[in-house]
Image: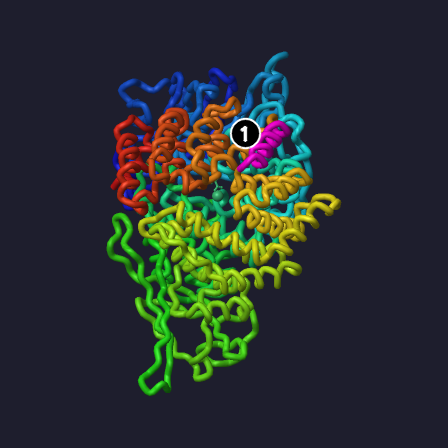
Amino acid sequence: PQPVLLKDYEPYPFAIPSVSMTFQLDPKETRVVTKMKVERTGAAHENMVLNGEAFERVGAMLVNGKQVDDDDMLKDDTTLTLMNLPHEFELETEIWISPEKNTELSGLYMSGGRFCTQCESEGFRRITYWPDRPDVMSVFSVRLEADVKLAPTLLSNGNPGIAGAISEERHFAEWHDPHPKPSYLFALCGGDYDVFADQFTTMSGNEVQLSIFVDKGDAERAAYAMDSLKRAMKWDEDVFGREYDLDVFNIVAVRDFNFGAMENKGLNIFNSAYVLADADTATDGDFEAIESIVGHEYFHNWTGNRITCRDWFQLCLKEGLTVFRDQEFSADMRSRPVQRIKDVIRLRGRQFAEDAGPLAHPVRPDRYGSIDNLYTATVYEKGAELIRALKTYIGEDAFKEGMDLYFDKYDGTATTIEAFYEGFEKAVGFDLSRFRTWYAQAGTPVVTIERVTSQDSNEAWLKLTQKIDPTPGQTEKKPVPIPLRLTAFTEDGTQINPETGEPCADHDSDVVLLMDQETDLALAPNAQNALVSANRNFSAPVKIQQDLTDAERLKLVTTETDSFAKWEALQTLSRAALLDMAKQIASGATPNVPTALVKAQAEATLATAGEDPAFAAQLLTLPGVGELFMEMTPADPAAIYEAKRLVRAALQAELKDAIFASLDAAKADTGEFSPDAASAGRRSLNAAYIDLLSATGTDHAERIYQAFDDAKNMTDTMAALRALSYCGGTYYDQAVSAFEAKWKSSPLVMDKWFSVQSTRPDHDAIERVKTLLEHEDFDWKNPNRVRSVAGAFAMGNHVAFHDASGDGYALLGDVIRKVDPLNGALSARLLTSFEQWRRVDEKRQALAKQVLTELQNAKLSKNAMDIVSRALA
Ligand code: DPP
Ligand code: ZN
């Protein structure tokens, strides 16, 4: 298929100021009648092209009440073209769709016997004929009719209107959304739910009724999501000055969902994994994710809904910005430094990998084959980093002023990245087009930092150079403005500004702007021998290569006052050591464990464990196999895993007392569970300790099993179960059985059970995953379940997925052939795990290529074909 190009954008030649829709809901066949008010805004000769697909039947098609002549319309599988239209008219269409046949989970479908929708990006065209593009915004009035027993609750966007009985069996409810919106934000839900209700009073005194609709019996498990929602509403008022704008805010939790959640105006629909939580069934990670995603979807109300995207190339306009907002929200709710570290781990694990492979694309691409495949780490996570870097570049005040200008000027419109930057340009008084180069170029910049001394040693400077490797379709790269936070520490540990030599406070940094390929930074006389720490707090999404010795980095671990930089100094040392060890292991040698580093890491952990256990847990966590995979040629995940195991074993020996003390304390803790950040921090350090215990085979399996048995919440349970999965042996088997017996009837908990087994990096992984795919509770139609097995295996088990036999690749190929006919968006997502196939050795490459080529020759969905062909290109 032809790619869609940014340069081809043209405004839609018609406006649809308002629309009213009637749904006669029925799982088998739902009738949809759509009446739109249309005004021509383009030239008189323009036809009206509407999208529409996967309908069961098409009925009446009326313009101003008269059936359209066959001569005046063209219909194919995906579009309807109307010709010879007047300047202003009412268009009425009638179609039938089958929600129960819809396994793509796009459009109107059934989940757990209830009606729900997903329209972003192009799902609305599966509900009715419509110009299904984000720049056509309308005021929607919706009438829902359904069987009163099947769907006693009927919801749509906006505010509720009248509701009542139609007959003894059927009833109706009307909804009106006064805010014009694009079709991708349309939603409806219908079913029998329990509800968790609350209120929020906005800053100007409006009462908002808040409701979270969940499966029967689950209402109490929505308490944390509700609490997060209220905090998010308050935070957006306090920090961005943004107030909510309807009488109600509804969230519906559904079991079957392609995304994490969806920001439909006034009616968010959530994957139940990101709504339901309690101590028994959810981990701290789940609580954290709920807070962040509830925040994210709520924040979309301003960044996404009231101001939306002109076209899908601008996706980062709403996603990057909203991720930035949710990261800031989480940082304010929890520990800011720990949040920053987690953001960076996520960025490195997913986005850096994407940027370095065949699927690399700019934050704002200029072409796409399939829009569903553009919901990427680059658009989301790198998009958020660019906002953060912009804020560092222009300063807090200008950032705030620019945001306010954007909200004021563009409210109610569908717009572009250029428009977003206008406000900031006005605030700073100069053009930011060079900064916007970041949006147009794929690839992660590498910044090299070297100390240079003049011949007579009187002067010294830092030579900073930047380079971006070629990415698919982009061989030439321009330098980008990189705001780099720097500081320097003198011999005696005094922190100074490297340029002025002035002493400075802990949190102060010098922000150096690298505009060009090379930037020289003159060092003040007292900074010439100082230790320079760069990219503090990860001020720019780049890789740093700095000419520091190991001893200097170890010094940074103890001297740095910026938590991120302290953590980063350890990570950089660990990365280098692990890669070195992995290379030796791959060549058959036995590597030495870097003892000085292990000691430093243990000391740093112990030094912070009491005061800030969440940070200590991060200090103890080694770079992931996935991250190291990117740095090794050819990549050998098994060797990387073994290198990590050796270092973890050395850390275990070093920290034995602290580990056992922590386990004992967890056992003795009889306090009530609380998901707050401080308690979660203590549990995360305990989990990091348990992980170390698992590094020496079954040596400590009995003690870990005890911890599993003693666990009083899901966080501790999962920490122990995961650790046992690394030990293997009978205690592990026993834990797996006990867990299943206890949680068999809790789908979200069972997803964890499936996932732990699928990520276990042992020799039997491939056979085990095959068995799990045959398990009676495995469900090919439920994305959470498919991800918990196939996704966990392909993306979270590098060792087994890249097994030398090629069986891991073949297994994923088989999964794709099963999933793809049901749900193309899901299969495409799973296929992205092939993105690193060129990094492994030639034998494995050949095996991966064979699977990809077979898939290319199979008849796969458009989404899947897009990924396969890009991976092979
Ligand atoms: N629901 C997805 C998100 O919020 C897509 N908009 O990112
Ligand atoms: Zn979003």
For the point 66% across and 59% down, the residue is 610
- Look at the image and give the residue range highlighted in magenta: 729-743
Mark 1 closeness class: few <14, some 14–19, many ≥20 residues within 10 Å: many
Left or right of residue 686, residue 575 in this image: left
Indicate whether 567 appears above or below 867.
Answer: below
Q: Position of residue 172 (x, y in %)?
A: 59, 21
Where residue 43 appears, x then y in whole percent? Answer: 29, 37
Q: Residue 867, percent across and down?
A: 32, 37
* Residue 510 versus residue 850 in the image, above or below: below
* Name of the residue lying farthest toward the top: 168
Q: Quadrant of the N terminus?
A: top left
Residue 736 belongs to magenta span = yes
Q: Is residue 769 above or below residue 660?
A: above
Residue beneath the point at 27% across and 20% down: 71
Q: Quadrant of residue 244?
A: top right
Q: Residue at x 52, y 44 (%)?
A: 697
Q: Nearer the viewer, residue 364 or 454?
A: 454
Element type at marker 1?
loop
Among the 4 quarters of the image, the one containing residue 592: bottom left
Task: Return the residue at label 1.
Answer: 255
